[in-house]
Amino acid sequence: MRTQIKEDLNSVLNAISRAAKEYNLDTTELIGRIKEMGITGAEANQHALFYALNNIAMDQPSWTFLAANLFLNELYEKAASNRGYDHKLKYGNLYELIKELTAKGIYSTELLNSYPKEEIDELEGVIIPDRDYLFNYIGLFLLADRYIAKDHEKNIYELPQERFLIIAMTLMKNENTKKRLHLVKEAYWALSNLYMTVATPTLSNAGKSYGQLSSCFIDTVDDSLDGIYLNNWDIARLSKDGGGIGVYYGKVRALGSDIKKFKGNSSGVVPWIKLVNDTAVSVDQLGQRQGAIAVYLDIFHKDIMNGFLDLKTNNGDERRKAHDIFTGVAIPDLFMKQLEKADENGRSIGEWHTFCPYQVKQMMGWKDDYGNPLGLEDFYDENDIKYFTEKYEEAVNNPFLPRKTYRAMDIMSRIMVAQLETGTPYMFYRDEVNRQNPNKHMVGKGRTSIYCSNLCTEIAQNMSVTTIVQEYQDVEGNLVMVRKPGDFVVCNLSSINLPKAVHEGGLERLIQIQVRMLDNVIDLNTISVGQAGVTNKKYRAIGLGTFGWHHLLAVEGIHWESEEAIEYADNLYEDIAYYTIRASNDLAIEKGEYSQFTGSEWDTGEYFYRKNYNSNRWVRLQENISKHGLRNGWLMAVAPNSSTAKIGGSTDGIDPLYAVEYAEEKKNFKFNVTAPDLNHETYDYYRRARHELDQVWSIRQNAARQRHIDQGISFNIYVRHDIKARDLLNLHLEAWKQGLKTTYYVRSTSQVEIEECEACHS
């Protein structure tokens, strides 16, 4: 027994020495200390792990990789012990793993039903254990802690490369069997090399018997008791399965409006939003975290200043608070123009009127082609005809239509105060979003089809209410409720790891397989809310995004605050857009176009004309799309990417770095994290971190990027806590003028780090 302990200890010490040599680390002190302690191999590994974590610093960032190696040893031992094989093999039999976890109810039976044993055995040979060494410590820790499959007692069974392969097998299981194994291998290549990550729900749930694969959902609430409560029911079911949710409340009548002709009976939107808040708290996401819900309201809604902007602040009546949801404001161009109006002394004089949407519908008489009443929220300004502005002025000029009138700057001041305290509300520039919508043909020019964004502000797709059209008793005496499904938005996300993919993977090959993976999520997903599934298949929307932008700039030697960074963003994201759209066109040739393609801007070519895509490659692609269609109605969206960016070993989304070095706290220990690929060359491009950078450069970068993204981008604004109101206002005005569709959090140095929803962190 003593000989075995000595062999185990020597094995650990030899492994430490090999890894230290690879990363050019001096472990003499560590090995000497372990030898003096007289401990077992497992204890030595644990001691070395904590030693490595304590030594991670700006001047020695490679300790994170040694720590990851030591943590891998623990994972290999635990998985081998639970599965019954020698841990020195690192990975065990894949078929036996699938069989055992299927029997335990962790994996879905679909894997064994879809793949015969000989195919699973072939795929086992694809696994490359050495790719585990691509992880830094925090990335590996997050993957192991949250995503790899465990049994019901939280014992580790699956290992990192098996998680990637199971995802690939799951997403490709319905492909043509003649090419299916090739496609699985391509997807595994993309995932295991960390060239891309899939969204959190897919990373966690693919291949398992529970949960769904899509990231975020957006619903439109009807102005009725049925609509409000059915929306809350739908939210609860989606939240249970791990989805992040955006909810548009702009159609719900305001405080003091009539109900069934009884004057002044409406309690407005705030009590209903409190109900949503309670749902977010009480229906958690698979026991991991509470539900994450963003509620949006138009800035011309009468309740905007009557409680909505104060929902999350710490002052005022607690009975009218909803601290656990997030808020967003839908803003037309006209409001931003009113902010710019000033008298000769520079004092803001622009007025803004707010209305109850129910009263607008009752009194203005606007109707669609089917005779349904329309409100202000149902119009937006095009570049040539200002549809919203015309309707807004009609409403203002109606002497019988009740309204509340404010200085536009007073509303904006309330928004900015809330943002500096809570980070929200998000800003949703509704005219620009609808102008850029390639599927506006579904309702017609000038008519709103996108009312708000999602929880993380990167999704922009057609929306409409779901309504109850009939309730009856069937022949067996059952009560049946018939709902007419509206467009209930679904986001299917994955993201390119820019520094790795641009330099190693090859964007063209990567995006080809990535778009197929995303498209397959649509058919594989089991969404508990029926109308969401209907919408998902109607438009087949996907959201291919990116992370690691600051990391990429650093390794490319490009300063954040530079024209070079803006030009690089413009060129890179045009390439990404081209490869993504082309991949969807290829899928349409193979599998068919999305059902609403005809008449869309993809079909007419208006999308390409508007983007000024006139080079030879774009002209050829447009011709192919006009002949063969497009598989997906929306294609690109850049999500926040926090946890999955850490797994990929890079920086969050498109954000600047939080700090060159910072402390991360996990469970019962604390360790340092340093910027990726940190060395004496990249340091200069990292050293000015988030709150030190001029945000105008960030806005201009994002505008260049947004030109090529058909949906939106999760874009944070970083400010110091003592920023002047005028300076924050100018940042918002700049974002609007530059054509940004949305802005995400305003992150002030006075705020604690905001806990975000990880559903969208693809």
Image: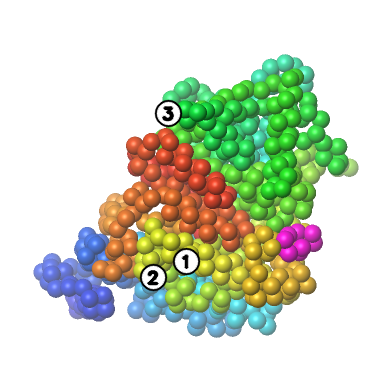
Q: Callout 1: helix, strand or loop? A: helix
Closer to the chain start, of discs 2 and 3, is 3
For label 1, the crowd category at 10 Å Cα-Cα, with few meaning under 14, some 14 to 19 and many 20 or more, is some
Q: CA distance from mark 1 to mark 2?
A: 10 Å
Q: Callout 3: helix, strand or loop? A: loop
Residue 308 can be seen, yes or no: no
Q: CA distance from mark 2 to mark 3?
A: 44 Å
Q: Which residue is mark 3?
A: 314
555 shown above or below 659? below
118 shown above or below 327? below
Q: Residue 276: x percent and y percent? A: 58, 35
97 shown above or below 262? below
Is 477 covered by the magenta stretch? no
Q: Residue 663: x percent and y percent? A: 28, 53
Closer to the chain start, of discs 3 and 1, is 3
Q: Residue 568 shows which numbered tag?
A: 1
